[in-house]
Image: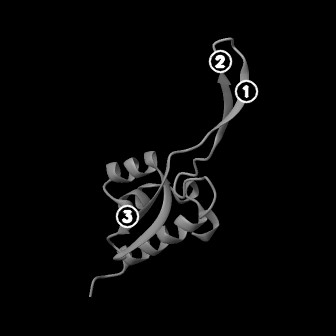
Amino acid sequence: MKDLVMTRRCAVTGKGPLVGHSVSHANNKTKRRFLPNLQNVSVLSETLGQSFRMRLSVSAIRTIEHKGGFDAYLMGTAETKLPAGVRRIRRRVAKARAAPAN
C-alpha cells in the first residue's frame, strides 16, 4: 500500500481530485480543484484476522459498510476494478476462504 500513501487518491475506489471553476456572482471563472473527502482508517479483514491502514474516501467507507465489511466488499468487486495493493489483499482473502478450516 506504499504506492498510495501520500497521493490524494482513494486506496480502494481510485477517486482523485477533479478540476473545475469557482464562479463569482459576476460570472468570473477561476480554476479550482475539488479534492476527495479522504480519511485515514483501519479496515478489518475478518477472514485474515488483520487490519489494514488505508486512506479511503468517505463514499468508499460507506460502500464497504453497505456490502457487509471489507472482505465482502473485496470478494464482491471484480479484481480488475481494484488497485494493485488491494488486489493482493483480495487474493489473500480468497486463498484463506478456500483453505479448509482445521
Q: Could you say which quadrant of the image residue 95 lies in?
A: bottom left
The correct choice, above or below, for 42 with respect to 37 in the image is below
Between discs 2 and 1, the one toward the N terminus? 2
In the rendering, which numbered label is found on residue 71?
A: 3
Q: Which residue is mark 1?
A: 30
User: As rendered, which of 17 and 31 lies closer to the eye?
Assistant: 31
Label 1: which secondary element: strand
Marks 2 and 3 in Cβ contact (< 8 Å): no
The correct choice, above or below, for 43 with respect to 58 in the image is below
Q: CA distance from mark 1 to mark 3?
A: 43 Å
Q: 84 left or right of 90?
A: right
Q: Position of residue 92 (x, y in %)?
A: 46, 75
Q: Residue furthest bottom?
A: 102
Q: Position of residue 77 (x, y in %)?
A: 46, 55
Q: Amino acid at mark 1?
A: Thr
Marks 2 and 1 in Cβ contact (< 8 Å): yes
Q: CA distance from mark 2 to mark 3?
A: 45 Å
Q: In the rendered image, which quarter contains the C terminus?
A: bottom left
Q: Single out the mark in the foreground, 2 or 3.
A: 2
Q: Position of residue 98 (x, y in %)?
A: 37, 75
